[in-house]
Each structure stands twice: as C-alpha cells, then as structure tokens.
Amino acid sequence: MPMYETLCILHPELPDARMKELSAWMQKILEGANGTAIQVDVWGMRDLTYMISKQRRGYYVRLEYESPPAALKELERNLRINEHVLRYFSTVQATSPVPPTSAPAAPAPSAAPAGDEAGPQ
C-alpha cells in the first residue's frame, strides 16, 4: 500500500478537546477504509501567510498513513465537507531511499587512447 501525508489547517477557535476529536476522526476514517495511521503530529497554532476564511491563524495537524487510494479519496471527501477544516493538502510519500552501497571507484580514463603514446602530429 502507498504511504501518504496529509496536512490539515483547522479553525483556530476550536477548543483543544475538539482538535483531538478531529484528529481521532481522521484516523477512524482511514481505519474504516483499511488504512493505518503511522504518525500524527500536532504542530499547534501558527500564523497563516494569507487569510483563509477571514482567519489569520490556524491549527496545524499532520497525518502520515499507509492506505489504499480509495481511503485517501474518502478522507479528502470528509475533510472537504467539514466546516472546521480551513485547508488540507495530501501528498504521496516517496518510497524510502535505498542506502548506497560502497562500490569501488572505477579507474579514471586516460586522456590518450591506448596504443597512441605520441599524440597527434
């Protein structure tokens, strides 16, 4: 299953208990669609670069999860209709990079082709 990351900006006037309920709600949507939440980061209240829905601040929540593509669509559908979500952005995580193996360095090629010692005349 592919790994996804979704960053949500929630309304700043929500109480902390409601913020926790919304993050649990997002996890429940994923689990209902055969997904698994790997990590939930609550970044807290931050200033926005520009106003969104007449708000200058927002509560940021980042959700990292593994799920089928249908679960992502279901999560985004629910985020779109929730009035407490100002913005959301989902990305597909790249597969984890394979650490490079320590291969011996190839010898540097010589400037002159083999057998032509004198060079052009």
Image (spheres, rainbow, N blue to C red):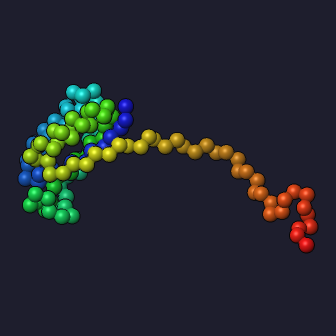
Q: Residue at x 77, y 57 (%)?
A: 109
**Count of marks overlaid on the render:** 0
Q: Residue at x 88, y 70 (%)?
A: 120
37 lies above or below 47: above
- Choose between 88 and 23: the one closer to the eye: 88
Q: Quadrant of the C terminus?
A: bottom right
13 lies above or below 65: below
Position in image of residue 34 (x %, y %): 27, 27
Position in image of residue 32 (x %, y %): 21, 27
Position in image of residue 67 (x %, y %): 31, 32
Most extreme residue toward the bottom, as rendered?
121
Q: Can residue 58 be seen at all in this image of the molecule?
A: yes
- Choose between 52 and 61: the one closer to the eye: 52
119 lies above or below 93: below
Position in image of residue 31 (x %, y %): 24, 29
Left or right, 93 with respect to 88, comes to right
Quarter holding residue 63 = top left
Q: Can residue 27 be seen at all in this image of the molecule?
A: no
Q: Residue at x 10, y 47 (%)?
A: 84
- Choose between 36 and 121: the one closer to the eye: 121
Quarter holding residue 54 = bottom left
